[in-house]
Image (cartoon, helix red, strand yellow):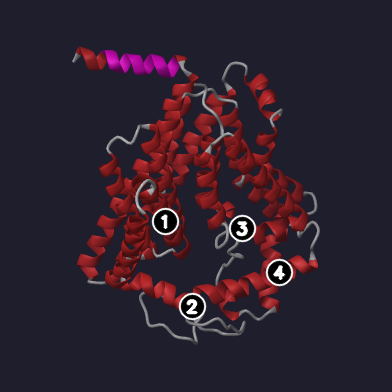
Amino acid sequence: MNQYILKFQKIKAGLINSSEMRFKIALICAIVFYVFGKHAIANVFVIAMGLNWLLTKGILRRVKLSLAKTSTWMLLMIFLLTVFGTLYSTDLKSAWRIIEMRLTLLLIPLIFVSTDYSKKTKIQILLTFLYSCIAASIVGLLFSCYNYYITNDSGYFYNDNLVMAIKNQAVYFALYLNICLIIIYWYLQESGFENKSMWLLVMIYLVLFIFLLASRVSILVSLIIIGFVFYNLYLKSRKVSNVIGMIILLIGSVILLGIIFPKTTKRFRSATSNFHYKFDNPNDVNHFNGQLSEQNWNGLTLRLALWQCSLEIIEEYPFLGVGTGDYDSKFREKIEEKNFLYAMKQDFGVHNQYLNIAISFGLLGLSIFLFSIGHLIFNAISNKNYLFVAILLVFLLGFVTENVLNRYIGILSFAVLTSLSYYKTKD
């Protein structure tokens, strides 16, 4: 009993005296609640982390030193563009709402770059994200089993239905799990490949879960990651025949998964069932749990139509864009102008972060954003920081089909994971 009292007293003393421990605990709690869809509670811990940062001794000096680094400005670039775009917005109410939502993209990088924390803390935070995602996936799976037992509908094991228990979306949770795959491989390297077999089983489980989530881009990314991992762990130093054999095995596994999980295969088939579209098509989008029809919209044609609308807006406002606050209204106007009947019934964005940036801040803003990303990647590669490069690439691929930085569900994960993986620890 005494040993537990002493341990509690040690933790209590650490919380009082150690800014790093308070930072770690607040961030860990924020991550856990965030992954499980409790965003309001997660925000409380993010605020607590911010207050701890503000009360840190010598914070002004640290911030000044941080802002002297070019990389800090590069990480802050999307927030800076958001503020700049407010200057010529007509809808200031919407502009301030977006600034408030993206404030995390300012605070999180500043907190990380001006906080001294150990490599142990970094590992613990990354593992917290990993363990939380695994636990959340199990909760989602159990909830789907319950719904299947009640309804006998296998559709509960696919796509958004699989993560509705944690109030998430399939496309975002699949993105998280791909980052988890990267974290596992990085952790294996850091730990000298201890418990390799166990972690590989976890990776296979995560890839299967991503397959059930049926997010097309994420499935392709996960297969690339798992192929890279198997090559580096088992095939790099082996004969060409073994490599070819493993490739055949992986392809066979993908085909088998397609047979076992036909609804996921249907998601891919629906995206290639028809490449033509008419804006005045009033039909719904092909669903994995229904019959495919060429008269319906599919994932590809819907995005092509949305992207055409965005390109026309960019042609009208090429240099600076429409401003931070006018993106929604201008996009809505274009949808109505094109008589895009299905989109008029929904609350669609452009489903592409790059086009969203170009609409809001023009080709100049998009160029600045891409330059900042390129600068960060170049620096990371120069410093052999491949963890950051891999995590950032997962987000950049996600940007192709989603407005990740227009929703809190994407903003916090982007801010935390890129900042945590980019900056060096104190040891």
Mark 4 closeness class: few <14, some 14–19, many ≥20 residues within 10 Å: some
Q: Nearer the viewer, mark 1 or mark 3?
A: 1
Q: Residue at x 69, y 52 (%)?
A: 95
Q: Residue at x 43, y 63 (%)?
A: 215
Q: Name the residue under label 2.
A: 272
Q: What residue type is labelled 2?
A: Thr
| Picture coordinates of residue 38, whole percent (x, y) | 42, 46
Q: Which residue is drawn at 33% across and 49% down?
A: 203
Q: Mark 4 points at which residue?
A: 311
| Picture coordinates of residue 271, whole percent (x, y) | 48, 75
Q: Name the residue under label 3.
A: 353
Measure how far apart labels 3 and 2 are at the Cα level.
22 Å
Q: Nearer the viewer, mark 4 or mark 1?
A: 1
Q: Mark 1 points at which residue?
A: 222
Mark 1 closeness class: few <14, some 14–19, many ≥20 residues within 10 Å: many
Q: Are marks 4 and 1 in contact (CB under 8 Å)?
A: no
Q: Residue at x 70, y 24 (%)?
A: 64
- Which span of residues is magenta-colored? 6-16
**The N terminus appears in which quarter of the rendering?**
top left
Which circle's residue, 4 or 1, is located before the other in the chain? 1
